[in-house]
Image: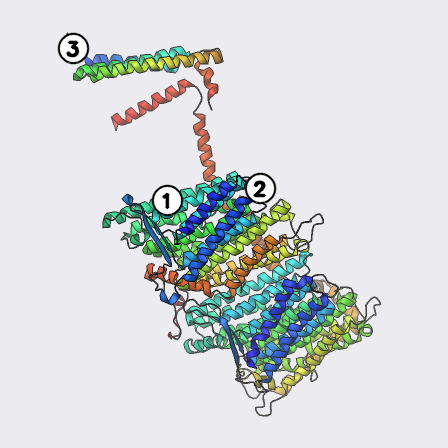
């Protein structure tokens, strides 16, 4: 049965091929079926394979070599799939969430032109993402890595008639490519120094040959980190993600929330050996994560566009994952990835339903009171918000975030400050999440909203809501080891965090974190339900306005980058459009023209001038001959 | 026959040549220019002859005859051109033909 | 049937096409396609019949050879040789030749016979360059490419064709003469030291030269190759020639003519002057990286579609040059793949630009936009080749660029890192092209037919080749492997630092200097 592994990435890619070649001629129902069905089949195959892992999972690996990709000298990467507990978690989330989002898209996109193009791109995305997580060498990983970037570009710019969408798409591609290039250089460095790019072998060699903290390990890890930062929209390369919301909502749910943006987390987890060899880089990851989760969370708090709130929230939540990676809590990061994939996809899909019901209105302050008209959407959205805010005990987000916070405190690489940032982030998260919920679904009832969408769109919502709650089960302690199930499942791949101090005040931490998220909810309740005037008044003050603007524009990163990079680059290319090097050659041509004219002037047509010239020349020649 | 002093003859040839050259430069009338050229050619011929007699070689006189023939050919072509020019421009002014510059 | 027929076939085909052109305009096209097809088939059969790689040692890489004396008094022979490297390039030549004829099917309406004569003569010259093993013969074919190309641009070109064609002619002719001086210098030095006056490449290989001689002769050769490649700062003929040439001309210029420069570097420059190349290697690599970035930056700012594509060629050929100067197996194989794939991807972009120009009568991108809605097939093709040109993994160009950078990292990490930023720059210009031409709002007055079956077929075949090379480059790499290995042995041993064998263990904690070699 393990021979079926290749089917997992193959199915969506086959779907893509069919849709590209025959797409425009197929009826819509067939297109939707192919697009959704292939991903569904992948999901089925991955579940079949997951059965082989059992509950414990540790150490179980399925590999399959497809063909030799290329072979030059000692560089010979294969197309080869590698499924262990880590990639299994990724594959399951990608295919299942992917399937649900595809299903949702059938309804969401039904009135759009380019229907088959949409499903083709989505299938290509799922295929590339699966190649990324199943790759057994870094070159194949890079193939998937760039593939998902491409699909992200194509889908952000899906509505291509609006130039703004094209701009957002290019911005996303180019900024992530900055990171990708660093990653590529990292690959060159790793191959040149360790002689292989097979991930497992590479990790063993790195461990064997590079002492912890050695300069080369730090540089290699830093380059990989740069790639991860670009893809996962962390500081300072986070600016593309809010703009990426120009794409259709299912795209935002699948690519820019659940899967692609977490590729960076996967990369770091996959090559965690390298990062443990480079403690400064690992600390940098934690700090980046903490800073990102705070800054993005604050930005999310003031956004008006429903999708931008969620986009900043995504950046912030991935910040949590980076924080976890930075303190060595690898499996906690993966756990949060999983729960985040469920509840964030749910929130985006719910937002999509709201947007459709409001005739493509994105401004949350033009919504309100949708609770009664869209009950299914409301209740599922509520579950999503609760999970995002990590409301205690019932939501999966609570367990994953709690695990991260606990380890941020107690792990060897953790500190009180990182923990405090996480707790503050939890408060902010809860604040903006409930703000979104209250503003959109409570308050004055607007009549022009339509009611809940059809079953193909609500079914994914319900399933995702169920998953958002049920994923918390993965946090149940394993009876044998006392560790949480997810940690145990991943323990064969990802080592447990080193605990600094066994006497962690767990209950105290739990209490504080719960208070933070409940406090955030209550604050949002006060500000947006009980005293909405007060929040408005706060923004109207002088300081409030400038703070608001700073947060609203995402801390002004865009402007800085425009000034620093985009502006000068555009200016340079514009003034050099005609290529100043060509001026040298043009200059040569110009001077020979001038010389030609000067010589032409001597041809006066006066025969006596010529005679004079001849005579003078003769005299000079003879003079030279005689006297020199 | 007493030998002709060679220096004197050479000076004479030089003077003649310079006179001819001056004529070419200063005269505007094409006929006079041609005549000045004849003077220059003959000055050169004179130098050849005296040099030939000095070294006792026949080459000097050979060259003089050669120059004579060449001068004749040149004059015939030159005068033909002058005639054409005169028909064209109704003038014997050499500068009038400056329009041919191209 | 041996290798000399590869040169004779296009030559004869060209003459026949010229004669046929007096009867009808269809005849020359058919004759050209038929003869190029025959050449392609012949090359393919040579490829097929070539002994398996294991049977050929690195030293004897020739798949087919032909040697007869031509002007024996001067030591000039008609010496041709085909190894894996030239085989790939000859295949590319015939293939792109066919594409060139097909894509000018409706574009060229005047003097079709003469057009095809010129086209075939250029191809003859190119094939000759790829096969010659005699320096005089090489120079002969090198110049043979030039004149018909000049005619192609100056007769069938666009508005500024006179300027562009003369510029092209002067650049290549001047640099060609420098190469001739280099050839003659080598000829006399070799003749004086051994008493054998010969132009034969295989005999000249081991010529003993003083460092000074070697450097100057090398510069003479390098001038010609660097202009053709083109390397910054000798590139400025290229955008003019490419944008003013007719479609087939641009295709052949970008797809093939530039490769003759790279081929010259690989086949002649480094093996003949290994020490001199070693001494200027870092300069060469820096120039390559500069070319990659400079070409990309210029491409980004262009308004003229064909000019944009032309500048991307400079950027892409920079990778080839980087691979050559890095001179190890990885980087050279990468350069070979990059040459082949650049021929296809840029060639296809020029074909697309030609189609657009035929339909819109302009090359200005401001007159385009939103074409996706009008011509989805063409837009899809444009997207594909744009992505190939930005080096998307899974497509052939990625293999080339990745191998080149991987190989050059061994030589200089910093230069490689700089060159790698070309990947960002290529994304910038490729996506800008997509946006300006195919995306954005559609202009209301814009109506045109989507690409026809003939055009779709051409482009689809080219796309398929790029995909196959991207996912399974094995056959291509295997073909060029013996040739590349043989050439590496001819280079200066210090040019190729040993790669790190698998399993070898290095003591840890090395300095950064060692790491960023």
Q: Residues within 10 Å of mark 3 (few under 14, many from 20)?
A: few
Label 2 SS: loop
Considering only order in the chain, which callout, 1 or 2, is on the residue closer to the N terminus?
A: 2
Tag 2 residue? C109
Image location (x, y in percent) of residue A152? 62, 65
Image location (x, y in percent) of residue C221? 37, 49
Label 1 SS: helix
Numbered tag placed on residue C178 in the rendering = 1
Tag 3 residue? B3
Does the CB distance between marks 2 and 1 fall below 8 Å? Answer: no
Label 3 SS: loop
Image location (x, y in percent) of residue A248? 69, 65
Q: Quadrant of residue B22?
A: top left
State the residue lying farthest toward the top.
Answer: B1
Vertical arrangement, residue A315 with respect to residue A45, above or below = above
State the residue lying farthest toward the left.
Answer: B1
Numbered tag placed on residue A612 in the rendering = none
Q: Which is more toward the observer, C444 or A36?
A: A36
Name the front one of labels 2 and 1. Answer: 2
Q: Which is more toward the observer, A211 or C90?
A: C90
Q: Residues within 10 Å of mark 2 (few under 14, many from 20)?
A: few
The quarter of the picture where the C terminus of chain A appears is: top left
Does the CB distance between marks 3 and 2 fall below 8 Å? Answer: no
The quarter of the picture where the N terminus of chain A appears is: bottom right
Give the left or right position of residue C367, taking residue A362 as reference.
left
Residue C314 appears in view: no
Q: Tell me the subunit letter for badge 3.
A: B
Cα gap from disc 3 to disc 1, whole angstroms: 62 Å
């Amino acid at each position: 049965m393990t021979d079926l592994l290749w089917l997992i990435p193959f199915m969506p890619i086959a779907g893509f091929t069919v849709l590209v070649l025959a797409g425009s001629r197929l009826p819509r129902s067939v297109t939707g079926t192919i697009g959704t069905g292939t991903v569904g089949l992948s999901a089925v195959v991955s579940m079949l394979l997951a059965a082989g892992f059992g509950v414990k999972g540790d150490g179980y690996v399925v590999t399959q070599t497809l063909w030799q990709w290329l072979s030059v000298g000692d560089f010979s990467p294969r197309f080869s799939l590698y499924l262990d507990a880590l990639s299994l978690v990724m594959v399951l989330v990608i295919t299942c969430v992917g399937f649900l989002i595809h299903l949702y898209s059938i309804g969401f996109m039904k009135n759009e032109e380019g229907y088959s193009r949409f499903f083709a791109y989505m299938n290509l995305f799922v295929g590339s993402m699966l190649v990324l997580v199943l790759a057994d060498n870094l070159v194949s990983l890079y193939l998937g890595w760039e593939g998902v970037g491409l699909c992200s570009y194509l889908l952000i710019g899906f509505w291509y008639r609006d130039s703004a969408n094209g701009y957002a798409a290019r911005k996303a591609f180019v900024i992530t490519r900055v990171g990708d290039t660093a990653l590529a250089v990292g690959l060159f460095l790793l191959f040149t120094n360790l002689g292989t790019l097979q991930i497992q072998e590479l990790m063993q060699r790195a461990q064997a040959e590079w002492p912890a903290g050695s300069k080369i390990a730090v540089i290699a890890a830093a380059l990989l980190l740069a790639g991860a930062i670009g893809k996962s929209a962390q500081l300072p390369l986070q600016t593309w993600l809010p703009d990426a919301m120009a794409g259709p909502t299912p795209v935002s749910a699948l690519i820019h929330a659940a899967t692609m943006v977490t590729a960076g987390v996967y990369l770091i987890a996959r090559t965690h050996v390298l990062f443990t060899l480079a403690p400064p880089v690992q600390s940098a990851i934690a700090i980046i994560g903490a800073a990102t989760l705070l800054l993005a969370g604050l930005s999310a708090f003031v956004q008006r566009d429903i999708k931008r709130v969620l986009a900043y929230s995504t950046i912030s939540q991935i910040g949590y994952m980076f924080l976890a990676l930075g303190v060595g809590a690898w499996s906690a990061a993966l756990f949060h990835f999983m729960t985040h994939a469920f509840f964030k996809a749910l929130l985006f899909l719910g937002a999509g339903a709201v947007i459709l019901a409001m005739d493509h209105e994105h401004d949350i302050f033009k919504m309100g009171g949708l609770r009664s008209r869209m009950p299914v959407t409301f209740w599922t959205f509520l579950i999503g918000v609760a999970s995002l805010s990590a409301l205690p005990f019932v939501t999966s987000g609570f367990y994953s975030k709690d695990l991260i916070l606990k380890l941020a405190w107690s792990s060897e690489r953790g500190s009180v400050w990182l923990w405090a940032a996480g707790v503050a982030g939890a408060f902010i998260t809860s604040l903006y999440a409930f703000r979104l919920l209250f503003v959109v679904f409570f308050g004055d009832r607007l009549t022009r909203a339509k009611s809940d969408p059809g079953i193909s769109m609500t079914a994914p919502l319900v399933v995702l809501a169920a998953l958002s709650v049920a994923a918390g089960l993965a946090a149940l302690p394993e009876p044998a080891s006392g560790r949480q199930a997810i940690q145990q499942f991943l323990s064969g791949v990802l080592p447990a965090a080193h605990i600094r101090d066994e006497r962690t005040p767990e209950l105290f931490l739990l209490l504080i974190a719960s208070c933070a998220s409940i406090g955030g909810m209550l604050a949002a309740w006060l500000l947006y339900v009980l005293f909405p005037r007060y929040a408005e008044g706060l923004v109207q003050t002088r300081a409030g306005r400038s703070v608001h603007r700073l947060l609203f524009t995402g801390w002004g990163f865009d402007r800085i980058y425009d000034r620093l990079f985009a502006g000068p680059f555009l200016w340079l290319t514009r003034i050099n459009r005609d290529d100043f090097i060509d001026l040298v050659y043009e200059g040569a041509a110009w001077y020979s023209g001038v010389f030609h004219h000067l010589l032409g002037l001597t041809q006066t047509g006066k025969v006596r001038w010529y005679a004079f010239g001849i005579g003078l020349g003769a005299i000079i020649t003879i003079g030279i001959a005689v006297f020199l | 026959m007493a030998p002709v002093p060679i220096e004197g003859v050479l000076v004479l040839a030089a003077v003649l040549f310079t006179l001819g050259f001056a004529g070419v430069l200063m005269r505007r009338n094409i006929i006079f220019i041609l005549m000045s050229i004849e003077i220059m050619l003959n000055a050169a011929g004179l130098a050849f002859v005296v040099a030939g007699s000095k070294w006792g070689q026949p080459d000097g006189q050979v060259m003089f005859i050669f120059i004579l023939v060449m001068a004749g050919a040149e004059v015939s072509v030159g005068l033909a051109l002058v005639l054409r020019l005169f028909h064209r421009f109704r003038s014997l002014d050499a500068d009038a033909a400056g329009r041919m510059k191209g | 049937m041996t290798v000399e027929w590869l040169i004779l076939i296009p030559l004869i085909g060209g003459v026949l096409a010229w004669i046929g052109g007096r009867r009808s305009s269809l005849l020359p096209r058919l004759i050209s396609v038929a003869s190029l097809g025959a050449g392609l088939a012949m090359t393919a059969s040579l490829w097929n019949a070539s002994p398996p790689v294991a049977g050929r040692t690195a030293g004897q890489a020739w798949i087919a050879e032909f040697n007869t004396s031509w002007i024996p008094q001067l030591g000039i022979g008609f010496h041709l040789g085909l190894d894996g490297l030239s085989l790939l390039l000859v295949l590319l030549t015939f293939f792109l030749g066919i594409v060139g004829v097909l894509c000018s099917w409706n574009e060229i309406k005047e003097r079709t016979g003469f057009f095809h004569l010129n086209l075939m003569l250029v191809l003859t010259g190119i094939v000759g360059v790829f096969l010659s093993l005699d320096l005089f013969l090489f120079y002969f074919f090198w110049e043979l490419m030039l004149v018909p190309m000049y005619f192609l641009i100056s007769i069938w070109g666009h508005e500024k064709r006179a300027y562009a064609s003369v510029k092209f002619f002067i650049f290549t002719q001047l640099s060609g003469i420098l190469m001739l001086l280099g050839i003659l210098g080598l000829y006399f030095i070799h003749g004086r030291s051994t008493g054998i006056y010969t132009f034969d490449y295989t005999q000249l290989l081991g010529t003993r030269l003083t460092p000074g001689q070697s450097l100057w002769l090398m510069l003479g050769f390098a001038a010609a190759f660097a202009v053709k490649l083109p390397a910054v700062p000798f590139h400025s003929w290229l955008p003019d020639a490419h944008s003013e040439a007719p479609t087939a001309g641009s295709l052949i210029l970008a797809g093939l003519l530039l490769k003759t420069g790279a081929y010259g570097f690989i086949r002649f420059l480094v093996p003949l002057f290994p020490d001199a190349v070693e001494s200027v290697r870092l300069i060469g690599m820096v120039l390559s990286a500069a070319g990659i970035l400079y070409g990309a930056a210029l491409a980004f700012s262009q308004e003229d579609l064909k000019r944009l594509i032309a500048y991307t060629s400079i950027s892409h050929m920079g990778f080839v040059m980087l691979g050559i100067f890095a001179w190890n197996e990885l980087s050279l194989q990468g350069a070979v793949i990059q040459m082949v794939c650049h021929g296809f991807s840029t060639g296809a972009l020029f074909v697309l630009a030609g189609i657009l120009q035929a339909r819109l009568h302009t090359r200005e991108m401001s007159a385009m936009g939103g074409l996706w809605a009008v011509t989805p097939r063409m837009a899809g093709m444009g997207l594909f080749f744009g992505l190939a040109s930005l080096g998307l993994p899974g497509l052939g160009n990625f293999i080339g660029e990745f191998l080149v950078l991987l190989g050059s990292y061994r030589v200089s990490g910093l230069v490689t890192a700089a060159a790698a930023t070309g990947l960002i720059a290529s994304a910038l210009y490729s996506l800008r092209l997509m946006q300006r031409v195919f995306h954005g709002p559609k202009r209301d007055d814009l109506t045109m037919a989507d690409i026809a079956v003939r055009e779709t077929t051409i482009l689809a075949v080219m796309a398929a080749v790029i995909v196959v090379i991207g996912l399974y480059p094995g056959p291509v790499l295997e073909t060029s492997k013996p040739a590349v290995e043989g050439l590496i042995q001819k280079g200066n041993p210090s040019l190729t630092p040993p790669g790190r064998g698998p399993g070898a263990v290095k003591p840890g904690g090395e300095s950064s200097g060692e790491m960023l070699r």
